[in-house]
Image (spheres, rainbow, N blue to C red):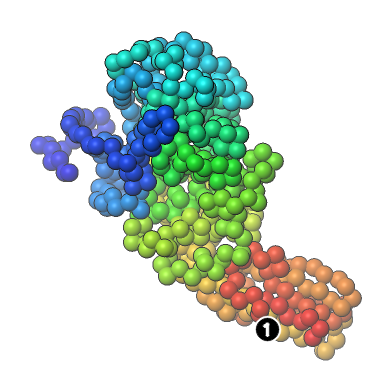
Amino acid sequence: MQLRLDKPLPPKGGKVSVKIHFRFNIPLDGAGRFGRQYTRDGVVYQIGQWYPRMCVFDEIEGWNTLPYMGLGEFYCDYGDYEYFVTAPAEMIVYGSGDLQNPAEVLTATEIKRLAAAATSDKTVTIISAAEAGKASTRPAARGDLTWHFSMKHTRDVAWTAGKAMIWDAARVNLPSGRKALAMSCYPVESAGDTAWQRSTEYLKASMETYSKELFEYPWNVAVSSAGITPGMEYPGMIFNNFNETKARLWFLIAHEIGHNWYPMIVGSNERRYMWQDEGFNTYINYIATDLFNHGEYVNAPAYFDKAFFASRDYMQFMQYKDPLMTVSDAMTEDQHYQFYGKTAYGLNLLRTVVIGKQRFDYAFRKYTEAWAFKHPTPYDFFHCINNATGEDLNWFWKEWFFTTWQLDQAVTGVTYIDGDPAKGALITIENKGRMIMPVAASITQTNGRTETLQLPVNIWYRGGSWTFKYPSTAKIEKVVLDPDHLLPDMDRVNNNWGYGK
């Protein structure tokens, strides 16, 4: 809806008040974003995207006029939220932000347990399975209660409610010394030491990792809610499927709370560039997985398993017909997961092959800090990483995000200077595809000596063939390109030369 003002809104402090009456019936499944989950002890409501909101006006596009069609999820602006939820007294409401009236809607026991959780690194039970749904958990037996929440400088708010959920919480330790609270609420049938009883542990660990590695979590509370939603993110509130367990639950929670960094803190335009939040978030999920509980889930399959970073899946990533810069809703349903996988794979290549972990981690953190609570375009990301790494990576940005080019490195020949291996070998390699990448060449001589040379991407700047001198002392037995299978090479047969030649 477009509202036309009688006169322009003055800059730097101008105000306009808009009051809208709205209502809707809560659907069973709100397109995977919110809905109702029927459980043994009643309905769990997960409520997001529930009120009319302002479009973003940015300095690049002006008003965001792209419609919401489902796949391209969010582009939201920042503001301060005060909201009130009136619900039957038997229900407990969990919301984004800080609860402002706990004495009116919680019991003295629950308030005391929450205070204990705020000082505990171990999960503290606020409402147990035995207590869930009992009258003793509510300050009033009947009627309605109004819950008042406040959240500052956020893009959105969401909430969940139910009358018989387990509730637990734990302290989150942030780099500045400030503390936050991680909470989970889930129906009794979701309990179990391989299931939702670990939700708060997973949430706390993810928040601490992202706060340390990227940018400190800016709010005071985060809630992981179990319900009908397969996995959905809102500031301070994530909706996850109540049936998930083990590694899948870990990765789901790490992924959805990770969205609080991208795009909730770093406010990119997901309507246009889905990779700029889904891909970044998938990438950081693997960082968190590597660090969680001594690598408990490092090799366990999950929604997006470790194969996203392994070359065995490069064929899938590199054969999509549309480049990553395709507008989100224009990507076909069967291809849109490249926004997650190809982006994460590309960032990992930059980190582990092209730039190195120390420089890339520094640059990625600087991007996050520079664009927190702002609206970066892809070009802001590209320029920021170039500047912070001190390296022109435009060749990579072009091929990885703007094209569907493929990589095919090959060894095409080995000769010897004056025909004498003791004087050195001349090794010729070719780049047969349009994509370019640095080269790792493992060289083995017949005397048993093996070493791996690292050749920079610059060797391809003047053409697709490169010959380099190798100081051999014996015949070359074999040459293998990309011996660790890190690159998305489409033909590995021609990566090998030798084996007895």
Which image quarter holds the N terminus?
top left
Q: Looking at the image, which residue is at 50% across and 47% down?
A: 281
Secondary structure at numbered mark 1 = strand
Q: Is residue 65 left or right of residue 268?
A: left
Q: Looking at the image, which residue is at 37% across and 50% down?
A: 270
Above or below for 364 versus 330: above
The one of 116 and 91 positioned closer to us in this rendering = 91
- Residue furthest toward the left? 6
Q: In the rendered image, which residue does mark 1 sit on? A: 412
- Give the class, few, some or many, for how many residues have Cα within 10 Å of label 1's Cα (few <14, many ≥20): some
Which percent across, then down, holds residue 172? 56, 28
- Residue furthest toward the front? 40
Above or below for 191 versus 424: above
Q: Is residue 387 left or right of residue 61?
A: right
Amino acid at the residue labelled 1: Thr
Which percent across, then down, holds residue 194? 60, 38
In terms of image quadrants, where is residue 309? bottom right
Above or below for 192 versus 67: above
Q: Looking at the image, which residue is at 43% across and 63% down?
A: 335
In terms of image quadrants, where is residue 13? top left
Which percent across, then down, holds residue 208? 58, 34
The one of 421 and 349 positioned closer to us in this rendering = 349
Q: Looking at the image, which residue is at 59% across and 26% down?
A: 123
Q: Is residue 102 visible?
A: no
Above or below for 365 versus 89: below
Tally the numbered discs.
1
Which percent across, then down, holds residue 277? 44, 49
In terms of image quadrants, where is residue 328? bottom left
Q: Is residue 497 visible?
A: yes
Which image quarter holds the C terminus?
bottom right
Q: Is residue 23 left or right of residue 291?
A: left
The one of 21 and 249 positioned closer to us in this rendering = 249
